[in-house]
């Protein structure tokens, strides 16, 4: 369930006028901006953007960017965008900051339904005039090339770890694929591929191609059946087993992919737990989960959070954040 | 230009009635079937299928399947389907006959525009309840697994050729990707990636990942710029260079991909040349080119054929085929 509280009817024109009042002249009425935009769903926000453009001849997003600042600005910017555009932006930020936060790309590829991911790829192309797959591939492999280059400079006899190549291949595979979205399960295939995954993980055989193939091409329903089968056969979940096997980039990405496909709500609970308990909260992570899930299932994630941490999510967020940013998050959580 | 001659207006109902007359009772009037269906475009054929279903309560395709036979039946079946469904069928036939004709999959992935390929992937999922990518990946890798198994049986110290793994990765990459469809060219990138391709081909370095990345993620316009740059720098086309380097499955697939992206009409002329000059013409290849290109650019391919072979395509086809199949092909070529 969603946490967002949005009125069933609203006037985009009135909202656009009220937002204009909030930003015009000296200073900005941040409370008013939050009270409006953080109580509107994706469709309503797009109506408001359009009305604002028609009435005032400027882009609401650009205007807010110049009026707001810091985490609050980044949060509002991400919140206003419609989902596909927002995911495109989130992916592009990761790509530009190469070699960090690639799990966000795995997350997007594995949490979204096939048609939603396709919409993100279209939005990405509209916005950046490249495909998401080429940017992911070029930037991760650029990182590899750079590593190779430094090694050559050192005249060292080191070869690039296969894991890094596999890491790139997994990422590109996950973003490229257009999975089947149906609910059919092939039980025999689930058994076969549970075995393939088991062999690949257990013996650290050179079977990463098979792990990549299974994770990046099978339907999500089929994969869940495969992971269940894995657990039945081996008495341990595949994610736990992976943790026992080490944590290079490739295995980490595999781990995130499986968690996102298996149960993305539990995955997001863990993301929140990690970003909150860090010294110096990771605001980007916090923002990402709130803006992408507030209209979807943040209430479920919130309940999982309480169950796991014995602390209410709103209390944790209230303690770790402040000012308008805090107000924005709590509003998205349905607490204002 | 197309070779298909279709009337600008027709009555789907009248066509459906005439087809019913042609197939009912003993024997079939194949000439009438050809005269109607091989003079209708994709949209008109779908209208006829619908009208036939409404009027006679049966599927025209199924009926024709039971009335016709041999190359003619396979040809009509493929011709009647709307393009996305037809490509899905062509791909599935290749997948089921594993280890043969994989170039057809490369062809589909590289000749079609991104949106067309996406339509094929949707049609494939509707028809087969799997994704195209998972079937390509599972069947090519199944072939690899089988090979590994035989090696284990022989207790031989042989490892699977990397080329076979790369072959699978290239195929899966090409069918998975949703390329950017815009016309922008980045000249610096074209130079960089022409160099990357050159290094990878020349030294037979272990750089197949880069070849796969470039070919399967860049936009077609960008790739053409890269291939042009290659030729400018090295005085030889990349396809010629590839031929000099050998012909394992991987290099062959790379060759087909580049030719299809660079100039698919020239590629199809070559396909026709090969299928016709074979001892025992390859009817599947002939059918494939005719049914997929008759509404698109078969006239251009025909001209290229004459220029290259000094023989008219219709004469070559008439010499190598016979009966209703011959009549069908020549009608699609605009010669009846």
Image (spheres, coloured by chain):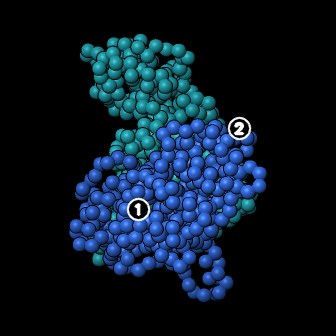
Chain colours: A blue, B cyan
Q: Position of residue A64 (x, y in %)?
A: 68, 53
Residue shown at the point (59%, 43%) measured from the top left: A46
Q: In the figure, A198 relative to A85: above or below?
A: below
Observer-nearest residue: A66 or B47?
A: A66
Number of residues whose C-alpha sits closer than 10 Å to that of mark 1, classed few (under 14), some (14–19) or many (20 or more)? many
Judged from the image, the secondary structure of the residue bearing numbered disc 2 is helix
Number of residues whose C-alpha sits closer than 10 Å to that of mark 2, classed few (under 14), some (14–19) or many (20 or more)? few
Q: In the figure, A98 relative to A118: above or below?
A: below
Q: Which quarter shows the N terminus of chain B?
A: top right
What residue did someone put label 2 on?
A: A55
- Looking at the image, the residue that sits furthest to the right is A25
Q: Position of residue A187 (x, y in %)?
A: 24, 56
Report how far apart the C-alphas of labels 2 and 1 lie in the structure.
Answer: 38 Å
Residue shown at the point (53%, 15%) measured from the top left: B9
The mark nearer the N terminus, 2 or 1, is 2
Observer-nearest residue: B129 or A26?
A: A26
Q: Is residue A196 something one can see in this rendering?
A: yes
Observer-nearest residue: B63 or A119?
A: A119
Q: Quadrant of residue A202?
A: bottom left
Q: Which mark is residue A302?
A: 1
Observer-nearest residue: A238 or A303?
A: A303
Judged from the image, the secondary structure of the residue bearing numbered disc 1 is helix
Q: Is residue B261 something one can see in this rendering?
A: no
Q: Is residue A112 left or right of residue B201?
A: left
Residue shown at the point (40%, 70%) measured from the top left: A311
């Amino acid at each position: 369930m969603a946490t967002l509280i949005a009125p069933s009817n609203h006037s985009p024109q009135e909202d656009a006028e009220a937002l204009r009042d909030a930003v015009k002249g000296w200073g900005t009425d941040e409370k008013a901006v939050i009270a409006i935009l953080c109580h509107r769903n994706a469709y309503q926000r797009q109506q408001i953007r359009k009305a604002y453009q028609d009435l005032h001849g400027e882009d609401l997003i650009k205007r807010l960017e110049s009026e707001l600042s810091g985490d609050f600005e980044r949060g509002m910017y991400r919140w206003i965008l419609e989902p596909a555009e927002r995911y495109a932006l989130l992916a592009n930020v990761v790509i530009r900051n190469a070699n960090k936060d690639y799990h966000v790309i795995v997350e997007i590829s594995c949490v979204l339904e096939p048609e939603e991911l396709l919409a993100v790829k279209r939005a990405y192309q509209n916005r950046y005039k490249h495909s998401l797959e080429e940017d992911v591939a070029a930037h991760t492999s650029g990182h590899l090339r750079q590593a190779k280059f430094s090694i050559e400079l050192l005249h060292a006899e080191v070869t690039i770890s296969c894991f890094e190549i596999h890491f790139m291949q997994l990422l590109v595979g996950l973003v490229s694929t257009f999975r089947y979205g149906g609910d059919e399960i092939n039980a025999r295939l689930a058994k076969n591929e549970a075995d393939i995954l088991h062999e690949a993980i257990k013996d650290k055989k050179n079977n990463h191609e098979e792990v990549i193939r299974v994770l990046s091409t099978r339907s999500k329903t089929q994969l869940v059946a495969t992971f269940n089968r894995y657990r039945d056969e081996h008495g341990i979940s595949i994610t736990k087993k992976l943790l026992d096997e080490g944590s290079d980039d490739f295995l980490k990405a595999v781990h995130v992919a499986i968690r996102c496909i298996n149960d993305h709500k539990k995955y997001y609970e863990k993301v929140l737990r990690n970003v909150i308990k860090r010294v110096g909260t990771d605001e980007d992570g916090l923002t990402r989960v709130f803006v992408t899930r507030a209209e979807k299932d943040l209430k479920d994630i919130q309940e999982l959070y309480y169950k796991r941490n014995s602390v209410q999510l709103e209390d944790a967020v209230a303690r770790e954040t402040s000012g308008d940013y805090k107000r924005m998050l709590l509003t998205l959580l349905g607490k204002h």
